[in-house]
Image (cartoon, rainbow, N blue to C red):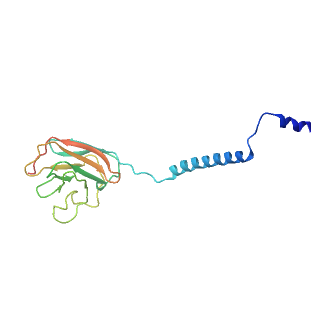
Amino acid sequence: MKANRKFINADERAVSAVIGVILMVAITVAIAATVYVYVSGMVGGTKKMAPTVQFTKDETTDRITVATTDSGVPWTSLSIRTDGTGVKVRINAEVTGTVGYTLTANVLAPIIEDVTGPPAVSNFLPAASPPSNIAASDFIDIEAGAAGLTTLTTFSIVHADTSSVLQTLSFTSIQAIA
């Protein structure tokens, strides 16, 4: 009996069993939530990343040329926007009065395959087999309407899947269509 009296007279108090169980459950829930967040982040879907495509501009020939690119990027995965009106573009071929795709100012135009039909709907990409992948030295030929553009004109190349602007290039003037 003397041994039991020692514990009764002590000033130290212990946490009750109920509080101990509640604390253990709380710690277990916190650890489970942390593991869930970590694992779901690893297992979640992969985010699409914009490809790396670098362009250079040539004001004398009114061309945007591909300097470097990741492999396997199709032209049809890109879109183009300009702030100029009456601007025609064509990929890897010359724009002429009847051939080329007329861009609408400040509207994102997806780069589409060449389709048979009138030049107004075709000739973004020249007639070819299935859409080709972008390669270094490919180019976008640019021409202005009959009067030509003499004001600053900006072009933005956008990756369609991610809506990422790959590059923005500005031309001080663009030659008129011959």
Q: Nearer the viewer, residue 22 or 147?
A: 22
Instruction: Specify whether 84 is left or right of 168.
Output: left
Residue 155 vertical placement versus 126 (above, below) = above
Image mark count: 0
Rendered residue at 62%/49% (across/down): 29
The residue furthest right is 1
Q: Is residue 100 above or below residue 58?
A: below
Report the residue that reaches farthest toward the bottom.
117
Point 16% across, 61% down: residue: 120
Q: Nearer the viewer, residue 134 or 121?
A: 121
Whole-percent x, y for residue 38 in the image: 54, 47
Instruction: Name the one closer to the observer, 114 or 32.
Output: 32
Q: Position of residue 3 (x, y in %)?
A: 89, 36
Look at 16% across and 64% down and name the residue there.
Answer: 118
Question: The N terminus lies in which quarter of the figure?
Answer: top right
**Which percent across, then down, holds residue 46?**
45, 52
Residue 124's quadrant in the figure?
Answer: bottom left
In the displayed structure, does residue 12 sit left or right of residue 91?
A: right
**Considering depth in this image, is 95 or 30 the residue closer to the camera?**
30
Residue beneath the point at 83% across and 34% down: 9
